[in-house]
């Protein structure tokens, strides 16, 4: 397969990725246009709505300027004046990232992985620019620079993860092929051997940049590399465990409070098509709720409007949007109380315990100080990742008090770092004692 073919196939896959994201909202809206409006209304209104949904799903800010009559009819304080929607419906971002991982895995199987990755990202950027400028209208105006940059950035993150996963899958095979010589080397030798083998067998991948990066990595002291590698793995694992735990608890809450959710559906009286569109919209913000619940378990909790608070300490809710999914949030707080707060602590302990063999060489010969530094680094990594997720899941949902929705990312990151670091110390100490 030559370079041009790889670039074209990657561009085609990028077109499909954008089409899937837009189609999730455009297809039901088009059905609504045909069934309820009998093709009489302007279809571009529905296109702009779908484009706005797709853009806000990737973190693009929308400036909304409603006319006075509609703003008054909504009954929301501040709806008459222009306001900004900055919260991201992370379901779309998660979908784009997941499809980007698939693109990265496919690109890694070709000798022109960089060409394929760049072609895919540039294609998404061009399509995002078209979507952004066709979505601009007087009532709703997406940010131009964010609309052009953020969707390809989200896709590029997925592609990068796919390339990393492909490299990690090749690493054990190359390490095994290296035989005793590779096994006898210092920790990290397997990574260097992997790069050398890949460069020797894949000339079109241009080994010079990779060689420079490996040279820079080799210049870093071995103990620092061991701590960084172990902390990155364990910290990411701890953050993933917290998110997974929040997802499981949210699923349980939906089942337990299913009656309240259905009751909110009935109050809205959206009809069949409206209910389907509402369900799709809720699925797009489901990852946000998972991250909010993770923030609750970490401690700071989250807000649904200025002055409100949902945390383990207490729950203070004012008027909230009538989204049926919000029916899982009880006015008096979650019944499982402080038990959920144990999840990040258990996650830090398990991540350090399960991954301690990765950092065993750094701790075995350098004592307790290195162990504590490793645990601190694990907490910092987990705190940064969870803080970034909290930042991405929060923002402005509308006018007035809806300007503040979601968790405080600084508090989430700081508290998560402390909890995971303390638990990681215990996990590493427990591992060391079991070996002794």
Image (cartoon, rainbow, N blue to C red):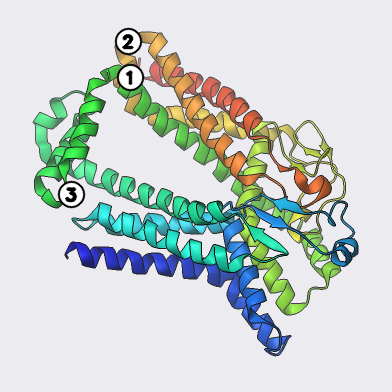
**SS at circle 3:** helix
The residue where tag 1 is placed is 224
Rate crowding at label 2 as few (under 14), some (14 to 19) or many (20 or more) other CA atoms within 10 Å.
Answer: few
Residue at horizontal 65 percent and vertical 47 percent from the top:
249
Q: How much space separates mark 3 and mark 2, taking CA atoms?
A: 38 Å
Taking the image as drawn, is residue 39 in sight?
yes
Q: Quadrant of the N terminus?
A: bottom left
Alpha carbon distance from label 1 to label 2: 12 Å
Kindly identify the residue that appears in the image at 35 percent across and 51 percent down: 162
Q: Nearer the viewer, residue 420 or 201?
A: 201
Residue 330 visible to the viewer: no
- Locate residue 190, reporting x and y percent: 20, 33
Compare marks 1 and 2 and give the one earlier in the sequence: 1
Q: Residue at x 26, y 56 (%)?
A: 115
Disc on res. 431: none
Horizontally, residue 269 falls left or right of residue 376, namely right
């Amino acid at each position: 397969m030559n370079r041009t073919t790889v670039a074209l196939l990657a561009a085609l896959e990028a077109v499909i990725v954008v089409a899937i994201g837009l189609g999730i909202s455009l297809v039901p809206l088009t059905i609504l246009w045909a069934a309820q409006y009998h093709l009489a209304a302007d279809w571009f209104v529905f296109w702009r709505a779908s484009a706005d949904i797709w853009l806000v799903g990737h973190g693009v800010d929308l400036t909304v300027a409603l006319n006075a009559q509609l703003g008054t009819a909504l009954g929301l304080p501040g709806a008459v004046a222009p306001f900004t929607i900055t919260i991201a419906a992370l379901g779309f971002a998660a979908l784009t990232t997941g499809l980007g991982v698939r693109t990265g895995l496919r690109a890694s199987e070709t000798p022109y992985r960089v060409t394929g990755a760049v072609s895919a990202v540039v294609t998404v950027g061009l399509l995002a620019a078209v979507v952004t400028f066709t979505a601009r209208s007087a009532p709703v105006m997406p940010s131009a620079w964010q609309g052009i940059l953020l969707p390809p950035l989200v896709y590029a993150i997925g592609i990068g993860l796919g390339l990393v996963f492909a490299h990690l899958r090749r690493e054990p095979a190359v390490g095994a092929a290296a035989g005793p010589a590779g096994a006898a080397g210092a920790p990290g030798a397997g990574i260097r051997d992997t790069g050398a083998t890949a460069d020797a067998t894949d000339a079109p991948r241009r080994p010079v940049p990779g060689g420079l990066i490996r040279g820079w990595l080799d210049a870093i002291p071995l103990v620092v590399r061991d701590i960084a590698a172990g902390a990155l793995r364990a910290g990411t694992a701890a953050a993933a465990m917290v998110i997974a735990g929040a997802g499981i608890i949210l699923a349980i809450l939906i089942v337990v409070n299913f009656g309240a959710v259905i009751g909110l559906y009935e109050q809205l009286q959206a009809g069949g098509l409206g209910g389907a569109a509402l369900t799709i919209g809720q699925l797009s913000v489901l990852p946000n709720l998972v991250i909010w619940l993770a923030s609750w378990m970490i401690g700071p909790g989250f807000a649904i409007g200025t002055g409100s608070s949902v945390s383990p300490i207490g729950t203070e809710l004012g008027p909230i949007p009538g989204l049926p999914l919000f029916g899982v949030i009880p006015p008096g707080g979650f019944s499982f109380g402080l038990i959920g707060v144990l999840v990040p602590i258990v996650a830090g302990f398990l991540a350090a315990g399960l991954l301690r063999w990765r950092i065993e060489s750094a701790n075995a010969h350098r004592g307790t100080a290195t162990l504590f530094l490793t645990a601190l680094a694990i907490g910092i990594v987990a705190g940064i990742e969870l803080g970034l997720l909290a930042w991405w899941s929060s923002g402005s949902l509308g006018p007035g008090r809806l300007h503040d929705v979601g968790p405080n990312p600084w508090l989430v990151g700081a508290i998560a770092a402390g909890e995971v670091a303390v638990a990681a110390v215990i996990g590493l100490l427990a591992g060391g004692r079991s070996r002794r």
